[in-house]
Amino acid sequence: MWKGAIGFGLVSVPVRLYAAVQEHGLRLHQVHDADGGRIHLKRVCEACGEQVDYEHIAKGYQDDEGHTAVVTQDELAGLPLPSKKLIDVLAFVDAGRIDPLQLSSGYYLAPESAAASKPYVLLRETLKQTERVAVTKIALRTRESLALLRVHGDLLTLHTMYWPDEIRDAGDLAPPSSVTVRPQELKMATSLMDTLSEEFDFEELEDEYEIALSELISAHLSDRPVPRKETAPAPDNVIDLMAALQASIDSAARKPGETDERPGRPAKKAAAPAKPARGTAKTSAAPRKRTSAKETAAASATSTGRKATAKTGTAKTSSAKTGTAKTAKKTAATRKPGRRAAS
């Protein structure tokens, strides 16, 4: 869309200018609501009432007293424009000095030929290493404007800029200096920002209005019912924001053992069970089983039988010991006379 050169000092870099952005959207035109007929705007002169062709339309300026100065297209084309075919570099400055409010349209700059590649790369690498941008002037569509030259990947880009006096003074729009925030509130706001920034991807953004408009037009063309979508009302206070900040802090300050349900956050490990204090009786992990009356009676009878058997066995053992002792006494009494006779 433009062909010229970048000039700084005695260095010249021939380049071509290409549009870097393309606005999308369905284009609507004016029609008659009764029959859908197109509405055409006619250029009618208010002085003579005649319709004027485009070739006879000139530019004009009217002063405060109502006097009009008529300027033709040829006169405009003959005005001197040093930056008409030249991107004139005025200065190289740090990127932080540029107010984003001044930036307007963006364009790609490509070397005009193979011979221009060497100085093109030299300028690109110098800007990159010094972390600077170039303030320039350029004339596009017969109008001169400021422009910013900077590095974008492997390309140089140009951003048209508003003149300093075109930026309005903010005046007293800012809150009064007496309004302050506490460190706790800053911490809450930072936590909310971190939550909203997790896994953010520019490529996933889409124009919801454009999608709804496309669905609306499609419904009209196919004679289908028109879809209805309501827009949520904007909050009229900051209470909802403070509640969101507090909820964010509560989520970040959960007790051990609780899981964090926010997306992208790992679950917290459960705390280990506390050890019992010394002197405390240990409890069995398994619950005790209840016994019925029959089971209790059976167990009692079994226990009684075991005791009786044990007593009988003890009695028999005692009787056996008594009988053995008596036999031993009789034997001893019989042996005594014989020993005396032998002596």
Image (cartoon, rainbow, N blue to C red):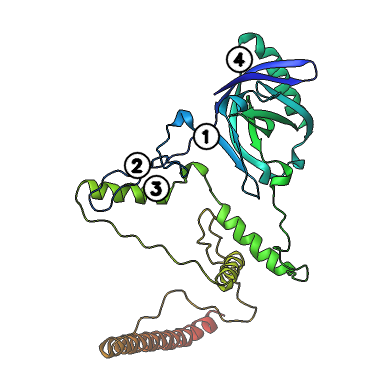
**Mark 1 vs mark 3, CA separation in Å:** 17 Å
> Which element is circle 4 on?
loop
In front here: 8 or 309? 8
Q: Is residue 42 above or below residue 190?
A: above
Where does the image place residue 221, in percent across and percent down from the top left? 23, 46
As drawn, the label of residue 40 is 2
**Mark 2 vs mark 4, CA separation in Å:** 42 Å
In front here: 270 or 178? 178
Badge nearest the viewer, 2 or 3: 2
As drawn, the label of residue 21 is 1
Neighbour tally class for label 3: few under 14, some 14-19, many 20 plus, Cα within 10 Å:
few
**Mark 2 vs mark 3, CA separation in Å:** 25 Å
Tell me the quarter of the picture where residue 227 sits. Answer: bottom left
Neighbour tally class for label 1: few under 14, some 14-19, many 20 plus, Cα within 10 Å:
few
Dot 2 or dot 4, earlier in sequence: 2
Disc 4 target residue: 112
> Which element is circle 2 on?
loop
Where does the image place residue 59, in percent across and percent down from the top left? 56, 35
**Mark 3 vs mark 4, CA separation in Å:** 37 Å
Dot 1 or dot 2, earlier in sequence: 1
